[in-house]
Image (cartoon, rainbow, N blue to C red):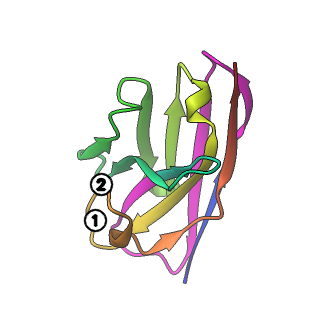
Amino acid sequence: QVQLVESGGGLVQAGGSLRLSCAASGRTFSTYAMGWFRRAPGKEREFVAAISWSGGNTLYADSVKGRFTISRVNAKNTVYLQMNSLKPEDTAVYYCATNSRDLPSRYVPVYDYWGQGTQVTVSS
């Protein structure tokens, strides 16, 4: 079993920044991709960003490209999401997830384990 714990969420004003962290523990895979998704109030879950084990292959949703950066430190089993120039539309619960096949993807079924989520609220 793999446990994922997100942290770093909070309340910020529009234009501000946050850095989310997701730490994996338990029975982790040797190599795995990781991704970030979010769910805004009253809306469906949507893809945000993903990264391969090596860090050399990344994907971003068009809505966050140029503002968000995904990275990872494998020695700590941790993935990060640096969020800059935040907008009220970014308000959501953010979830991280793992893909044991090391395949960065925007599609939910690819991922094996999910964290509990961390709330990000951006005020206008």
Residue 54 visible here: yes
Left or right: where does residue 76 sit relative to residue 13? left
Q: Which residues are magenta?
A: 7-36
Q: Residue 90 falls in which quadrant of the image?
A: top right
Q: Residue furthest bottom?
A: 1
Question: In what quadrant of the picture does the N terminus appear?
Answer: bottom right
Residue 76 belongs to magenta span: no
For the question of whether residue 8 can be seen, the reply is no
Q: Which residue is mark 1?
A: 102
Task: Inspect the image, locate mark 1, and give the three-letter code of the amino acid beneath it.
Answer: Asp
- Give the image location of residue 75, x and y in percent: 47, 56
Q: Residue furthest right?
A: 11
The image's mark for residue 52 is: 2
Residue under the point 40% across and 75% down: 29
- In this rendering, would 101 be left or right of 39? left
User: Taking 109 as reference, is 92 above or below it?
Assistant: above
Q: Amino acid at mark 2?
A: Ser
Q: Residue at the location (51% across, 81% down)? A: 27
Residue 104 image point, x, y percent = 28, 56
Main SS of the magenta segment?
strand
* SS of the residue under disc 2: loop
Kindly indicate whether the residue at mark 2 contacts the one at mark 1 (C-beta within 8 angstroms): yes
Question: Picture quarter containing residue 31?
Answer: bottom left
